[in-house]
Image: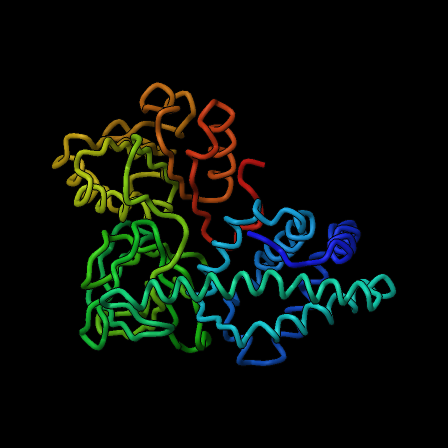
Amino acid sequence: MSTSLSPHTIAIIKATVPALAEHGTEIVAAMYRRLFEDQDIEALFNQKNQNNGTQIHALAAAILAYARNIDNLGVLGSAVERIAQKHVGYAIHPEHYPYVATALLSAIKEVLGDVATPEVLDAWGAAYWCIANLLKDREAVIREGITTQSGGWIDWRRFVIAQRIRESETITSFILHPEDRGAVVPHQAGQYLTVRFDTAGFPGMKRNYSISCGPNKDHYRITVKREAGVGVSAFLHDKAKVGTVIECTPPVGDFFLPDVIERPIVLLSGGVGLTPMVSMMEWIAAAHPEAHVWYVHGTHSRATHAMDAHIRALVSRHDHMQAATFYAQCSEADAANPGFITIDWLRANTPFQRADFYLCGPRPFLRAFVRDLIGAGVPAAQVHYELFGPTDEEMAA
């Protein structure tokens, strides 16, 4: 990944790092206020992440990381890939980038005041378009890869809920078939769908949900935890029924298994973080039955444990698969380990340093295990993770 920025521009961007570290969230909040004056632009964004502040903090952290590494953009390759994948999922196109440029530069001027001289604003304008062009180019490649496959499409396509499956007291799966009865592009095991639907109080609401079935050309399955309140998950659990139409963009995401499996695989999940793991298990069972897989899952109790029977059935049919479960609240009748997953348990019961680890779960779960796995000697390149929501930090930090 290269930059065409001049040494002078790079020096100016580097000089603004202290101001960004102090005022980055203010700048991003001001930028979004300006962007959302246009309702068409506002509709492109996940408003839940806006309202709870996670997107503001995530973008502020990303801008700061960009400024700090403006002379070594190669270290940002994974972040650029993650953002490009998400942009394709949210149907963001090249024509949207100028709106962000105008809003960002205006926000920098508003928040930094006299520090934001014309020279500083020119430098940040050049820096913005440098990264924007990288993103646009990558997004074009992603879209081309989707549309050249059978069943591929661009932007929003109508799907019908064909089946609802109650997986636990808080989690329900939804089987989605295209309304046009055509094929769907097979996802890579671990990727997600962006869904959109209109309902009272939530017009055009969007959410990302991991696909919880193995790749196929017929349908997708999303598995949704009901969160507190009256939001989108509540609508899906309480109102959506067989026949309800939702819209989806094609599967995207940078968290997935490689086509060639060279090492043992350890899948590690907490709570509803099991969803991409189920997809991975199904794909491995179908495409790589010779692969050695350990699936370790932690949840509150049997009542909250989703898809347990499905996983047990997969494991029973494949000699090289093993599964273990931990319940925070565990009775003697439960076929699970009491308490929480520990590094010591993983070291004793999995290939550990020889394995590729794939993790998904709540932020504290990920932060602890990414840090502790690497600290215990698992190479960082063998630790892969998916965080639900904006990623604003490295979990190993």
To which quarter of the image does residue 230 belong? Answer: bottom left
Does the image show residue 213? yes
Residue 144 spot, x, y in % from top left: 36, 66
Residue 57 in view here: no
- Left or right: 239 with respect to 243? right
* Left or right, residue 314 beside residue 126: left
- Left/right placement of residue 86 relative to residue 157 reads right
| Nearer the observer, 41 or 115 | 115
**Camera-side residue: 28 or 172?**
28
Horizontal and vertical percent for residue 319?
14, 30
In the rendered image, the vertical position of residue 268 relative to residue 54, given as above or below: above
User: Which residue is pictured at 41% across the width and 60% down the height?
Assistant: 208
Where residue 266 sits in the image (x, y, percent)?
Answer: 33, 33
Based on the displayed image, in which of its 4 quarters is residue 58 positioned? bottom right
Residue 113 placement (x, y as % from top left): 84, 66
Task: Give the residue at x 32% y 70%.
Answer: 239
* Above or below for 316 versus 71: above
Which color scheme did the rendering employ for the protein?
rainbow
Is residue 390 or residue 78 the one in the foreground? 78
Residue occupying image coordinates x 55% and y 52%? 1
Q: How many marks?
A: 0
| Residue extending furthest toward the left | 317
**Quarter of the view holding residue 101:** bottom right
* In the rendered image, the vertical position of residue 290 relative to residue 209, given as above or below: above
Quadrant location of the C terminus in the rendered image? top right
Q: Residue at x 72, y 57 (%)?
A: 6
When the figure is inspected, residue 255 is found, relative to residue 349, above or below; the finding is below
Q: Residue placed farthest to the top in the image?
A: 348
